[in-house]
Amino acid sequence: MAPNAFKGSLGAIEAAEAIAAGVAPVFPHLEVVQVPLADGGDGTTQCIIQATGGRLFRKTVTGPLGDKVEAFWGLTGDGSTAVVEVAAASGLALVPPERLDPMRATSYGSGELIREALQSGCRSIFVGLGGSATSDGGAGMLQALGFKLTDRSGQEIGPGAAGLAQLHHIDTSSSETRLKEVELIAGCDVDNPLYGPRGAAYVYAPQKGASSQQLPQLDRALRRFAAVVLRDLGRDISRIPGAGAAGGIGAALAGILGAPLVPGVQRIMELSGLPELLAEGTTLLVITGEGEINSQSLHGKVPVGVARLAKTYAVPVLVLAGKVNLNPQQAQKEGISAMLSITDGPLSLAEAMERTAELLQSTAYRAMQLFYEGMNAAQRLNQ
């Protein structure tokens, strides 16, 4: 059982439990293994911690709008990798919809979590990008890590994109020295550049509360950031695929801190041990899923990432989703054997979301009955 969260209704851990509850009665003699997954956004830390027997640490940090929030980070069971998800400290879910303000929202809290993780003795830090309320290019995160970002008068710039628009100089001399002792890896499921028509401002800022009038301002602030980084640090962050992730935090991580931007689901599957499970050669079936599977799922989403991995081990994959809007031929090409919608009749979205756990369990049960009969039929044909 390797599902993503069903956003707004069920976390990945609960989704895996619901699917397992439907599978176990049909196959009581088989081991049902739960490997809940994420793509770098909300739920990333919990999934990795559960899969590795790791630990969760709570930390009060600076929230997106400057107030204090209770955030968290994780450490894998062997202590080698710390996990920080941007959403935990700088996420959309931390800001009431009526207060969303990408001109002010800062990623400072995400930097505080990274700074805390550096003290754990880990060898690497995985940063999950997704679900941020910010459009500050990761400037706040850099400030929390000791970088000096100053305006023309030599004063530290203020928070958010409004502060970034005043950036004149970047000084790395007092940055956190422990950054050089660990490997930073950023999980990213988009390839958007930092600025421009496909950049962080125009593509993602509207969902963070930006008005149409603010979009050019946000884009100009990110362009200014890139120009100062190029002049002061000699690094071109404007052309990095994925630099626009999490309001430009991808640019700061990849272009300034040297973190490779990797598909989030790929790295999370590795940390969760899914490749090793499949390599054992004893897996009969993988069941994955999320709220909707569609053409966007081909770009770094959990079900397709799982299918591509399972395909290399010739393991069939069943996708359970609230909505199925992916071409079946395309799905098969990616390694998906079958896709099923979990709705069992005419339902409103609210009703379906309220009953997600129940619908997942019942759909998994019915699917396994068919799978069981198919196995029996195959055995009879081979006799």
Image: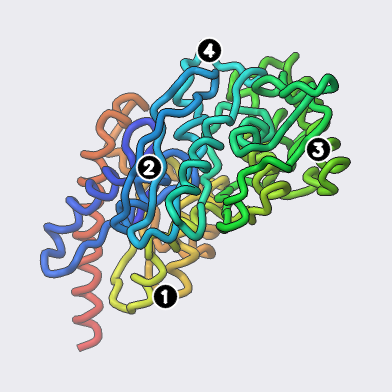
* Separation (CA) of disc 4 from disc 3: 28 Å
* Separation (CA) of disc 2 from disc 1: 25 Å
Residues at badges 2 and 4 in contact (C-beta under 8 Å)? no
In what quadrant of the picture does the C terminus appear?
bottom left
Residues at badges 3 and 2 in contact (C-beta under 8 Å)? no
In the rendered structure, find residue 226 and report the number of the disc placed on it. Answer: 3
Q: Is residue 178 shown left or right of residue 201? A: left
Q: Residues within 10 Å of mark 2 (few under 14, many from 20)?
A: many
Q: Nearer the viewer, residue 138 or 100?
A: 138
Circle 4: residue type: Arg
Task: Establish if 124 lies above or below 11.
Answer: below
Task: Establish if 80 lies above or below 301.
Answer: below
Q: Nearer the viewer, residue 116 or 137?
A: 116
Marked residue nearer the N-terminal end (2 or 1): 2
In what quadrant of the picture does the N terminus appear?
bottom left
Q: Which residue is mark 2?
A: 5
In the rendered structure, find residue 314 and report the number of the disc placed on it. Answer: 1
Q: Is residue 327 shown left or right of residue 18? A: right
Q: Residues within 10 Å of mark 4 (few under 14, many from 20)?
A: few
Circle 3: residue type: Ala
Circle 2: residue type: Ala
Counting from the top left corner in percent of width and height, residue 41 is at 48, 41
Residue at the top extreme, as displayed: 98
Residue 171 seen by the camera: yes
